[in-house]
Image: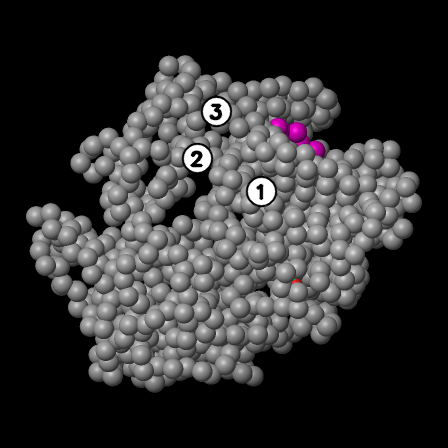
Amino acid sequence: MLEIGRLTVEGLEKNIVTDERNPHISYKVKSDVQNVCIENCHIVVSDCLGNIMWDLNTKKQIEIPYEGKRLEPSSEYRVDINVKVSNGEEASASVKFSTGLMTKRWPWNFITDGSYSFTEKKVSPEPMVFKKSIKAEGKVKKAYIYATALGIYELSIDGNKIGNRYFAPGFTSYKSNLQYQTYDVTEIFAEKNEHDVRFTVSGGWAVGSFIYSRNNRFVADRQALSAVFYFVYDDGEVDFFGTDSSWLVTRKGQLKMADLYDGETFDSTVDIESAEWQKAEVENLRVNPEISAECGAPVTEHEVFEPVSEKLLDKTDEIIYDFGQNFAGIVRFTVKNAKKGQVIEIKHAEILNPDGSLNTSFLRSAKATVTYICSEGTQTYSPAFTYMGFRYVAVKGVKKEDFDIKAIALYSDIEERGSFECSDEMLNKLQQNIKWGTKSNFVEIPTDCPQRDERMGWTGDIAVFGPTACFNFESGRFLKKWLKDVRSEQLSTGGLPNTVPANGFGFPVTMPTMAIDWWGDAAVLVPWALYKSDGDISVLQDNYEMMKKYVGACRKWAALLSLGKHRFIWHTPSVFHFGDWVAPDVPKMQQWQKRSKWTATASLYNTSKTLSEIAQILGKEEDAKEYRKLSQNVADAYESIFTDGNGKLHEEFQTAYVLPIQFNMFRKENKEKAVDNLVKLIEKNNYCIGTGFPGTPYILFALADNGRADVAYKMLLNTKCPSWLYEVKTGATTIWERWDGLDENGQCPIGDDGTDMMISYNHYASGAVGDFLYRRVAGIEPVEAGYKRFRVKPLIGKDLTYAKAHIDTAYGVAGSEWHIIDSVFTIDVDVPVGCQCILELPDGTSKEYGSGHYTATVKL
Ligand code: BGC
């Protein structure tokens, strides 16, 4: 039977609102017959009256840009597809989408509490509540609210929250890009024509205190809100109006304090109706961003955790709850028998002290505290304008028997698309930890960590982690939205801020024009990871100019004040680099940075080589040649200057071997010797990891792909510190920032080591090993972007007796599952319709398959 698996517009199956003039359509097809391919897909797009806007016959399946008649704003459309495959079967499906306001100029005012001026440093503003009774002047056929803010807003109608999104309008580079949300409130206004509409607006990222220096008022001096109401009546009349000075505003509501790092204070005893309300004032914004329909992945509620243990700490009278998992989110609690004015305080942390109390020292300035002032009786509360990274909470001010608490994971709506499992339970736990690292740090933007006073869009972290994220999660919308900000924030010289959105974070303030290896490389590596995983060429097209400017800047910095081959050694002073960031074999930050000559030069090779491939794909032959030449020069310089010309580095450390080996920068005969030298270093290090951010994603590939699968497996399965499985052995439920973050007693041995307590237990970067689990252990990797053609070639080794991975690719599920029983290797592969799979077996033979499920067996 033939079925349409998933039909999407702009990557979504439902609730689709877009401002794109050429939204992209994709579909997946499932068939139980082998070897079918698409004969034709008939796509028809029509408007709400059934008029045909576009009609296309195509064999393409993914990212088909709509090219029909001009789409109108605030309108509904329908996409119908009929797919015919090679065995004659057919299937049909349809999906609806709406257009947003489709205008570059936001059509309405922003309003604020004009009496509020707030100048205090390092804190967030008092939350504001705006209200108005909104009336529809006729029988409603359609009613939409479009809303945005500088600050974080929540919309409620008659006391009920509308939508399931947290942190609207989302985190973007507010000077350039601001999103608005669309709420379909047709049912509400069709039932009754007048409603109490309210917006609560906190400071959020735009106005509140954010980044570790706790800057505030980054793009506005106080919160500003704008909403547009669009009503279509049964008689065809249209009403279009928005926020103005007829709205009322108060700062005396129940929400007393809301701050992304510090938490929330909520006083339920406050009667907001009798609070002082005053007229809102129109606010002139300091910034002039492009305001467009939400294009990323909104943050919503996901997993719910019940405590796995609860303990009363006599000393402090706190109840300590353990949720069994470190994650980003909030608590939700119900309190019974409460007395009016009773104060409940909840603190959050990732680890405990030896006496069982919370260890909050690594949160730095983030207070991560929820304070709730009860009214009489039973009540339920959860914060809505903040989140924390935690596993444990300490609750004060309530009796255990009167208190019921849960925790809820909050993260961007990224669909889980990949799974990996094997016969080693510790590796399976590592895979789960990698997934939790992603969930906890895909909150609006790709962050470094969810707990301390950072949670910033550190570019280096996602540059190295991108491929792994794309195996496990459908990351297209989430990363494309972030890349839009990366483009907006690129400096005219080609350099990039180290965090995007920078949101006032000055670094590298001393050298604002600087390009920084690996961190800036996100400009090339993130679009490339996304393209390879999803096959969406628009991600290369949209980012190509940015990549060129960035690589151009790197090349200039490398060449600065140098001659001959030294022009291709990127040698700017190490204070302007992160180098081999968090490499565990040298303890000091300055030592990580000192390795920048090697990491930066290898980065220049990698970005220029990748860019030459991208140029080739985009048909830009001249560019392709130029960047290839540049990469060759860099490779030659690395080998001539850093090695003895015989595969041995003058200064040896794991990353300095891993990068050139993995990127193929050495001549063939020297590469083999370099691999031997790397192996010697690893053996000397007891098969423990010695790489920082740049080397970690590649070390196992550098070994396994060069005849040393044995060493790769020994490292992967090592449980001595530092290693991936040491963290698992020590009870980690996510990936740590520092390999030695906890000793075997669960305590942090690092202390104040000059990194400003940079110790987080939820930092995905070294989880980049996930790429190896999919591509080598399970053996599944795209050969052509989006898995149009993919290879299955498992790397059997050590004592693993089975491994399996499935990825719900843009075409459908691609899978590999192998078992070894009595020296017989059996493998099952799944190939989606429209794809080809090359299966390479351990005996050196290979087979090529079209779509379907296949099994092959080899005697080992
Ligand atoms: C962050 C990192 C980041 C690094 C660069 C840290 O504070 O948490 O993950 O990439 O700084 O300096």
- Kindly identify the residue that appears in the image at 62 percent across and 50 percent down: 550
Q: Quadrant of ligand 1?
A: bottom right
- Kindly identify the residue that appears in the image at 57 percent across and 57 percent down: 491
Discs 3, 2 touching: Cβ within 8 Å: no
- Kindly identify the residue that appears in the image at 44 percent across and 76 percent down: 124
In the rendered image, residue 172, in percent from the top left (x then y), is placed at 46, 59
Magenta highlight range: 791-795
**What's the amino acid at mark 3?**
Gly
How many neighbours does mark 1 have within 10 angstroms: few (below 14), some (14-19), or many (20 or more)?
many
In the rendered image, residue 806, in percent from the top left (x then y), is placed at 54, 36
Q: Is residue 786 above or below residue 642?
A: above
Q: Secondary structure at mark 1?
A: helix
**Which residue in the protein does label 2 denote?**
63
**Alpha carbons under labels 3 and 1: distance apart:** 21 Å
**Which residue in the protein does label 1 denote?**
529
In the rendered image, residue 821, in percent from the top left (x then y), is placed at 67, 28
Q: Nearer the viewer, residue 110 or 2?
A: 110
